Image (spheres, rainbow, N blue to C red):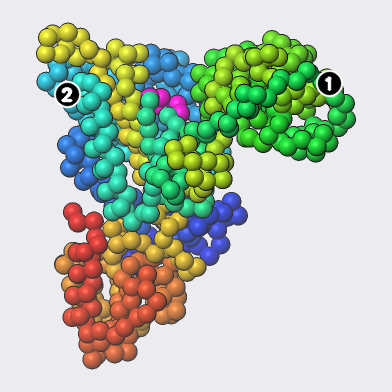
Amino acid sequence: MKLSKMHIKTLREVPNEAEIASHILLLRTGMIRKLVSGVYGFMPLGWRSVRKIEDIVRQEMDNTGAQEIHMSAVQPAELWQESGRWFAYGPELWRLKDRGGRDFCLGPTHEEIFTDIVRNDVSSYRQLPMNLYQIQTKYRDEARPRFGLMRSREFIMKDAYSFDKDFEGLDESYRIMYEAYERIFTRCGLTFRPVEADTGAIGGSNSHEFTALSEVGESEIAYCESCDMAATVERAECKDAAPSPDGEEMLPLEEVYTPGTKTIEEVAGFLGLPQEKTIKALLFVTFDDEGKENGYVTAFVRGDRELNMIKLVNALGIPEHAIAFADEEKMHQATGCVGGFTGPIGLHDCKIVVDSELVGLKNLCAGACKLDHHIKNVNYGRDYTGDIVKDIKTLKVGDPCPVCGAPIKHTRGIEVGQVFKLGTKYSSSMGAVYKDENQKEQLIVMGCYGIGVTRTLAAIVEQHHDDDGIIWPISVAPYHAIVTLVNVKDEEQTKVAEQIYETLQKSGVEALLDDRNERPGVKFKDADLLGIPIRITVGKRAPEGIVEYKLRRDAEKSEKTVEEAIADAISLVNAEGYGM
Ligand code: ATP
Ligand code: MG
């Protein structure tokens, strides 16, 4: 493609809302174009890179024997009501009605649709296992669309669904997908880490997120350097502190005056207690299917711990959007809690969730449910109990690893893919069965596997850029090489540049020819910004058959003969291209 003919508009200034490198650079290069918040279009260069990622995904999926199909983004509400997710998915589900008033949604994911296909089409064990996938546009009305393609409301996802006879079959399907994901993200040039993850609104038992390591990533990962434990902080188990010694006596309750000490730091400081000897209370209100308030929840964790919201909603068995921090005044009327002074004694009419380690700890200090007062020597069992007792605390930096005990570290990553063992969640709610060898009906066992194609594009830019622009890995670069013609008025230079450009293309090197009537400085800057991996500059020494060869990722450039430059470009692309 000749740049003089290409539809491309690079930007000097990008909107203030673009805060991270990938968002800024994808806008500056003109690869993506914003339509409204969280909705983007792709311009020629951007779309080429999207298609390359899709091709890598497609090749690796096809290699596993998965079969590509393409379903509509429009999904009837009935299927979501059958699975129970019409409510559970909450406000992220982009709902719409047809002219007859019938409910639909724009698919955020396709478990219901694929389960429906399989319950209709599969009847015998002979048809299993099977894996169906698609690469398709998804819609999620995200609360906070941000970071461009990273968290958008419309995005491209590869979603695959496996169908097996039993759980052993699922384990195998899951392993095959897990390994395909490792190959896909490696070929996309990402530095990534698979970590154990929560199953969220998708459901199921077991899950891994594939996270591209990056400071701007929204997934926080807890990991251990001594063993291979790595999990999202949402998911990571946090071991209970050792219980108080058997010999420690339960002391009598003692109400103490603690004026103005609303936080744990304040009360611990005021009473001269370590924070580990206190109990922290967090107050919540919950909502029903229609979004009406239907109850209160108080969660208790040790004073120095942090509550883990995902563990709390999982313990309660409700979706994330069905709970919010309570209005303290309103909750006080209903339950007797007192903002800043809430403890388990004196609370009523609310569900009490207690972190598991509190059960074994003696003589802790908690709020007295009375303004400016706390109670010392509170003991689980003697003074209060919980409706639910579970690990609801966050595994923090320095906490002991739940597997080996070494101090935990945290890092951040961009979730580019996730794999789930769904088990029979959808097949049982939607009745997807097959007949086994003995003609007995059995539930189909499912897994599902997503890759954010457009988020992967952003993650690649996040990991591959410098101050001058993008540095595309060859496998996903919109073009492999750019031939920069220094002086378009010079016939000799033009002839050599065109010859190189044509030879490259004939040899499978996707090339751009910068034949614009611009100063060389402008051309070099644009080539760097666009991040084209190989630059061949045709200038003054063209008549001698000498050109300049430079890789975007390297600082140095070198002079080569035309033939050498072409040969080097071809061999680099053969080695690192995506190899269709
Ligand atoms: P997140 O936790 O980031 O909201 P998720 O866990 O809800 O994502 P999945 O349901 O696992 O997402 O979807 C599969 C993949 O689709 C994700 O791994 C991610 O790469 C991509 N994805 C999800 N939501 C978005 C979004 N709003 N914008 C772009 N890509 C997304
Ligand atoms: Mg996910």
Front label number (2 vs 1)? 1
Q: Residue at x 26, y 30 (%)?
A: 171
Identity of the residue drawn at 41% across and 27% down: 202
Q: Is residue 202 left or right of residue 347?
A: left
Q: Which residue is mark 1?
A: 255
Name of the residue lying farthest toward the front:
247
Relative to 80, residue 540 above or below: below
Question: Residue 522, located in which quarter of the rendered image?
Answer: bottom left
Q: Is residue 517 above or below residue 413?
A: below
On the image, the x and y values in percent for residue 273 come to 77, 35
How many angstroms separate mark 2 from mark 1 (CA)?
Answer: 65 Å
- N-terminal of the pair, mark 2 or mark 1, is 2
Residue 191 sits in which quadrant? bottom left
Which image quadrant for residue 415?
Answer: top left
**Residue at point 37% right, 70% down?**
553
Rendered residue at 25%/43% (across/down): 180
Q: Is residue 27 magenta?
A: no
Amino acid type for the residue under numbered disc 1: Glu
Taking the image as shown, residue 172 lies to the left or right of residue 244, namely: left
- Mark 1: few/some/many CA within 10 Å (<14, 14-19, 20+): some
Question: Which three-letter amino acid code belongs to the residue tagged 2?
Answer: Leu
Question: In terms of secondary structure, where does tag 1 sit?
Answer: strand
Give above or below for 276 relative to 337: below
Question: Does 448 appear above or below 25?
Answer: above
Residue 320 in the image: x percent, y percent?
54, 26
Q: Which residue is mark 2?
A: 128
Q: Which residues are magenta?
A: 200-204
Whether the residue under disc 2 has CB within 8 Å of ligand 1: no
Q: Nearer the viewer, residue 399 or 450?
A: 399
Which of these two is toward me, 319 or 145?
Answer: 319
- Residue 153 image point, x, y percent: 47, 38
What element does badge 2 sit on? loop
